[in-house]
Structures are given as C-alpha cells and as structure tokens.
Amino acid sequence: MLKLLSATPSPFARKVRVALLEKTIPFELITINPWDASTDIEAYNPLAKIPVLIIENNDALYESSFILEWLELEYPSPTLISLKPSEYKKMKQIQVLTDGVCDAFILLFFEQLRDKDRQSRPWIERQLKKIYNAMSLLNSMVPAVGFCVGDRFSIADISVVSAVDYLSLRFEAYKWQDQFKNLEQLTNRLSSRQSFLDTVPTAQEIDQSII
C-alpha cells in the first residue's frame, strides 16, 4: 500500500491527499510535523520537505507536482489532468501560480516570526506583491461557474482550493475573499466535495529553534 507523509496545514501535501481520495487509491496517511526538530524527514527526502509518497520497495517520491503526475500515469482513472493542449496549458499555469502563492506566503510567514528589529520590510512587501499579483491573475482565470479548466474537476481546482484555504488558515489578516470574488465562489462551490472535507487544513506548532 502507498504511504503518504503529510503535514496537516501543508497545501502541497493536501493536493496529493485530495488526488488520492478522488482516485480512490488506498493509502496510509502518516502525519508528521516537518517544523519539529525531532522529525527525521531527511530520511525520506534529502530536501526535508513534504509531501513524500512512499511506493513499492520503499522508493520515495517527493515534490507535489511530480507526485501528482506519477499518480496520473499509474492510476489514470478518473483523470485529473487534461491532455488537450489549451486545457493542459491553463491547468499548468494555475498550478504554477498557486504553488508560487504558497511559496511566497511561507517566506512571508517565517520572516514575520523573526524579532521585529530583524525583519526586512522590503522583503515582506516583495512577498505580499507576489501573492497579490498571482491571486489577481488566478481570479481572472477562474470562471464564475463550473470548474477551473474545461467541464471536469482537475488538478487546477485542487490547486486553487488548497492554496486559498492555506491562506485562510495561516494568514487571517489577508482578506482575499474581499478582493477575489471568482476565487471565493469557486472555493465555495467545491468545498463540499468529500475529498476537501476530509482534508481541511489545521495548524501545527513550529519549533522556534529551527527557524
């Protein structure tokens, strides 16, 4: 059976969890805290990041986009990736943008954990600008009705919901719903899917000694 190393707030791990559930692939969920100094994530991923998918012979796959592509090849039904050129292009653009939003926020989040006198305001503003620019473009790409790409649920929808729910969890002060109505409506439409209900993100404590 597949094993997935995941963390409860991670939007990257959540994408893989949702895909596994949507494809009804049996897997063992192993929840860890990568920000706990005692967690030996490097035993599975030299980059010390999650998610990690452990397959046969204890072979480990890491980086969410690669894991999702592997799952699509190994378990093609139901498909979550459109191979129509125009749809594939849009789907990948959305995936890149949502990953970028999450990466920028993680940089912002840890910068703001530093003592005030050690924080860089230009660095913070740079991350906020990345988030705003990407969210603005995503909002223009998401339709008012239906799914992100074509007429079916896909990796694009998983990516958007995972990213904006992560912002809601870790960045409550950023009222993205007030600015990006298409994203809000999409999230509201899809949040009742069982795969999202089963993977609602929750916060984990961060070991300050490793920051």
Image (tube, helix red, strand yellow):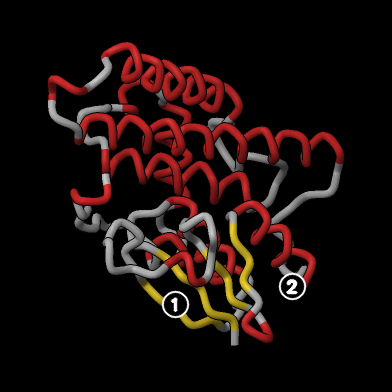
Q: Which percent across, then down, holds residue 122?
A: 33, 11
Crowding at mark 1 (Cα within 10 Å: few <14, some 14-19, many 20+): some
The structure residue drawn at horizontal position 61% and vertical position 40%, both measured from the top left corner, is 95
Residue 202 higher or lower than 198, as above or below: above
Q: Amino acid at mark 2?
A: Tyr
Residue found at the very far left of the displayed protein? 116
Q: Is residue 209 left or right of residue 6?
A: left
Crowding at mark 2 (Cα within 10 Å: few <14, some 14-19, many 20+): some
Relative to the observer, which residue lies in front, 44 or 103?
44
Residue 47 higher or lower than 119, as above or below: below
Q: Amino acid at mark 1?
A: Leu
Of label 1 and label 2, which has the lower sequence position?
Answer: 1
- Residue for badge 2: 75
- Residue for badge 1: 29
Q: Which percent across, then down, holds residue 44?
A: 52, 70
Q: Which percent across, then down, holds residue 48?
A: 46, 58
Relative to the observer, which residue lies in front, 125 or 198?
125
The structure residue drawn at horizontal position 22% and vertical position 53%, both measured from the top left corner, is 206
